[in-house]
Amino acid sequence: MAQPVVRTGTRLALIPASSMQLLHAIFAAAAIILVTTLSNAALLTPDDFIIAVDLDGDSAENDFLNGLDEDITNAIDGTLDLYLNFGGTNSGFIVTPSLGPTVVTSFQITTAVDVPERDPTSWSLFGTNEPIASLNDSDGGSESWSFIDAGSISLPAARDSLGPVVHVNNVVPYASYRMTFPTLKDSNTTIMHFAEIQFDGTPTPLLPEPSFVSMSSVCGLAFASARRRPRRRV
C-alpha cells in the first residue's frame, strides 16, 4: 500500500499506512458514538418552517386562524397552545427542521385542551428533499413525496397530556416531512387538533469524512504513532 509523503522542514517523512488505518478507525468509532447519542434527539424547534395542509383541500377555512391563537405554529412552539385544522380527516402539516436533513424514527403528540373527539387515531408520514413550494392551507402536493410509514395512534383521554412514543420505520434522511391524520376519534367531526408534536431521530450528516480533516491533524496523529515505535538496533 502506498504511504502518504509529508514534507517536514527539509526532509521527507512517510506516514505509516497503519496510522492512516488508525485514523479511519477513530472516525468510525466516533460516528458510532454520535449515532448512539443523537439517535433520539429532538428534531423540531419553534423556529422551523411549518405550514398547515389538508389532502382533501378542505383547509381553506383555516385562513382566519393564521396569526391568531390556534394556527399551525402552535404545533411546535413548545407550549400547550392549541393547533386546530378545519380540514378534519387527512389534514396535518409540512415541516422543515432547521437542523437540515434528518432521519425521523419516532414522534409524540400532546393532546389538546378539550374535545377528545377531534384527536387523531392514525397517521401517515412522507418525506422530500425538494424545496417546499406548497402554500399554507393547501393540499401539500406541490412536491414529490416519498412514503415513509403509517400506523395507528392511541392518544390519552386526558387533556394537555403527552401521548405514547410512536415508532417510525425509517432510515432515510429527508429535508422536509409531511404528516397527515387519516382518521379521528369521531369520524363525523370536521376538525382535527392537538397541542404539540415532536419528531425524534438523528440529524445528518453526523461526521465529516476523513478526507476533510486538515493534513496537519493527519500528520500529527501519524508522527505521534510513529515516534512511539521502538527503533530497531543495527
Image (cartoon, rainbow, N blue to C red):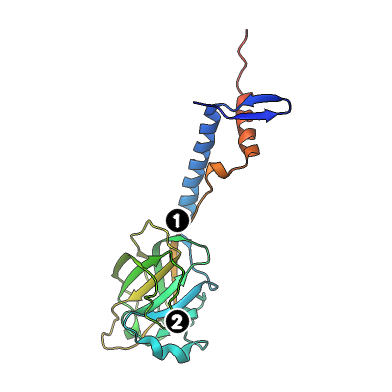
Estimate the x, y position of residue 162 in percent, counting from the top left.
Answer: 41, 73
What amino acid is labelled 1 in the image?
Ser
112 on left or right of 46: left
Which residue corresponds to the image point at 57% horizontal and 45% vertical from the top-left? 212
230 in relation to 9, above or below: above
**Near-viewer residue (1 or 230):** 1
Residue at label 2? 136
Q: Residue at x 32, y 79 (%)?
A: 90
Q: Which residue is mark 1?
A: 39
Q: Residue at x 46, y 51 (%)?
A: 35
Q: Give the residue at x 45% y 89%.
A: 63
Q: Is disc 1 surrounded by few (<14), some (14 to 19) or many (20+) residues within 10 Å? A: some
- The amino acid sitting under disc 2 is Asn
Q: Position of residue 179 (x, y in %)?
A: 37, 72
First in sequence: mark 2 vs mark 1 = 1
**Residue at the right extreme of this rendering:** 9
Distance from label 2 to label 1 (Cα)? Answer: 30 Å
Q: Quadrant of residue 230?
A: top right
Residue 174, horizontal then vertical, whole percent: 42, 62
- Asked whether residue 80 is in view, the answer is no
Q: Image height check: is 1 above or below 74?
A: above
Q: Element at badge 2? A: loop
